[in-house]
Image (spheres, grey):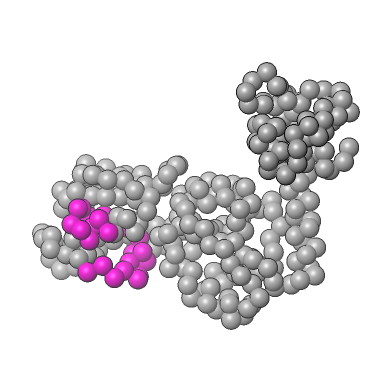
Amino acid sequence: MDLKRLHYFYTIAKEGQITKAAKKLHINQPPLSKSLKDLEIELGVTLLDRNHRRLHLTEAGEVLFKKVETLFSHIDDTVLEVKDTGEGYQGKLAIGCVKTCFSNIPERLKQFRINYPDISFKLKEGDSYILAEHLINRDIDLAIVRLPLDLEPFESVHLPDENYVAVLPSDWKNESKGNAISMDELSKHPLMLLHRISGVGQYEVILEKFKRHGLEPNIILECPDVDMILDLVNAGVGGSIIPQSTLSNNKLRNIKTLNINDEEIQSQSAIIWDKNRYLTKSAKRFIEMFQ
């Protein structure tokens, strides 16, 4: 059984169609179909159910698919480790980052470029759930995410906790004196909150804080993009509650920032990576900058 035949089977199973798999592999359909048939004859089992428009794995096909997926991930890691040993600090480092955590990146990236000028970067933005998926799919090497998140598949380094603050249009009046606002007053304002595309996150944490005070917030909008929310606050649509570091480079004029004086809403974040994947030298050095 050769690796090419297994690779063909794996691609067919992932794509669900011979036509799509042939296009992805840049080969014609007939030899691809023959390769699949030869593999089934060799193993003495049917691997794919062909009675539907989209091919489905049989029970035997499921077993082989999972084993092949593991096999190819080990091969990829082996190649990466061998190249890493020979090349050292070269190549590309793929980093995922939640937009509200981006303040952790610029200075570290600048210093890293000084220390390792032969490394280039790919940055990918997304919410914590999406970035975790990208890590598992090996689209990125590491990610900076907001918690809560299921960390079981990952190694992690926790970053310092930070407070959430209220942001309101600058011409809105608030009852509390000074640079502060209460949860009760916040509940009376129309609020726009960050909400993950999938999974449980800070949105649910903030709702729980209001609930503790016996309050029902007036949420008029949910959005995964903090820049969109800040633009809407700037336009006077509503207020929000966001991590303080998100405002580090804020240049919007019509926004005021207020501390929440009767509740501590804290955000936890971490840099994470796949515990079952080989970590390159460059990725290790980048992680060390957070420790």
The N terminus, quarter of image? top right
The C terminus, quarter of image? bottom right
**What range of the chain is rendered magenta?**
231-253
**Residue 64 placed where, x, y %?**
77, 33
In percent of the image, x 62 and y 23: which residue is there? 53
Q: From this viewpoint, is residue 166 visible? A: no
Q: Which of 256 and 76 is in front in this view?
A: 76
- Residue 55 placement, left or right of 181: right
In percent of the image, x 70 and y 27: which residue is there? 57
**Residue extending furthest top?**
51
In percent of the image, x 35 and y 70: which residue is there? 248
Q: Nearer the viewer, residue 110 or 149?
A: 110
**Residue 120 placed where, x, y %?**
61, 70
Residue 8 colored in magenta in the image: no
Q: Which of 20 and 194 is in front in this view?
A: 20
Decide: is 132 above or below 18.
below
Q: From this viewpoint, is residue 44 visible? A: yes
